[in-house]
């Protein structure tokens, strides 16, 4: 599966990752049809 991965400030990559797995009985895997980010989600991207 593909995922957007933050490697460091200003370094975001779209790459292949392992498929998610159920490990604990309380785990869940969901499929999203749309997502968005909040401005506060950008602090790690900016390095703060």
Image (spheres, helix red, strand yellow):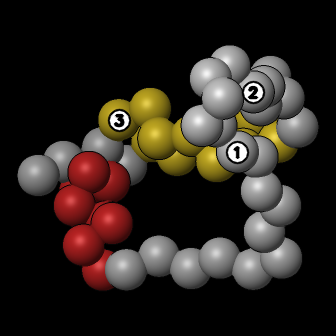
* Tags 3 and 2 touching, CB below 8 Å: no
Q: Nearer the viewer, residue 32 or 44?
A: 32
* Tags 2 and 1 touching, CB below 8 Å: yes
Q: Residue at x 30, y 80 (%)?
A: 39
Name, please, the residue furthest toward the front: 25
User: What distance separates the C-alpha of mark 3 from that of mark 2?
Assistant: 28 Å
Image location (x, y in percent) of residue 27: 64, 37
Q: Give residue 31's quadrant in the image.
A: bottom right
Q: Residue at x 82, y 42 (%)?
A: 2
In this figure, which residue is indicated by the disc labeled 2?
Answer: 22
The answer to whether residue 33 is above or below residue 12 is below
User: What distance separates the C-alpha of mark 1 from that of mark 3?
Assistant: 28 Å
Image location (x, y in percent) of residue 46: 23, 57
Q: Nearer the viewer, residue 25 or 2?
A: 25
Q: Residue at x 31, y 65 (%)?
A: 42
As helix, strand or loop, the secondary structure at mark 3 comes to: strand
Query: Which callout, 1 or 3, points to the residue nearer the camera?
Result: 1
Q: In the rendered structure, which disc, 1 or 3, sits on the residue that comes first in sequence?
A: 3
The answer to whether residue 24 is above or below residue 4 is above
* In-image side of 28 versus 13 (left or right): right
As helix, strand or loop, the secondary structure at mark 2 comes to: loop
The quadrant in which the N terminus is found is top right
Q: Is residue 17 visible?
A: no
* In-image side of 38 versus 2 (left or right): left
In this figure, which residue is indicated by the disc labeled 1?
Answer: 28
Query: Which callout, 3 or 2, points to the residue nearer the camera?
Result: 2
Q: Give residue 43's quadrant in the image.
A: bottom left
In this figure, which residue is indicated by the disc labeled 3?
Answer: 8
């Amino acid at each position: 599966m593909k995922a957007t991965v933050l490697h460091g400030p200003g370094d975001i990559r779209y790459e292949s990752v392992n498929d998610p797995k159920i490990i604990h009985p309380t785990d869940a895997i969901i499929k999203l049809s749309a997502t968005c980010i909040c401005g506060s989600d950008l602090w790690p991207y900016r390095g703060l």
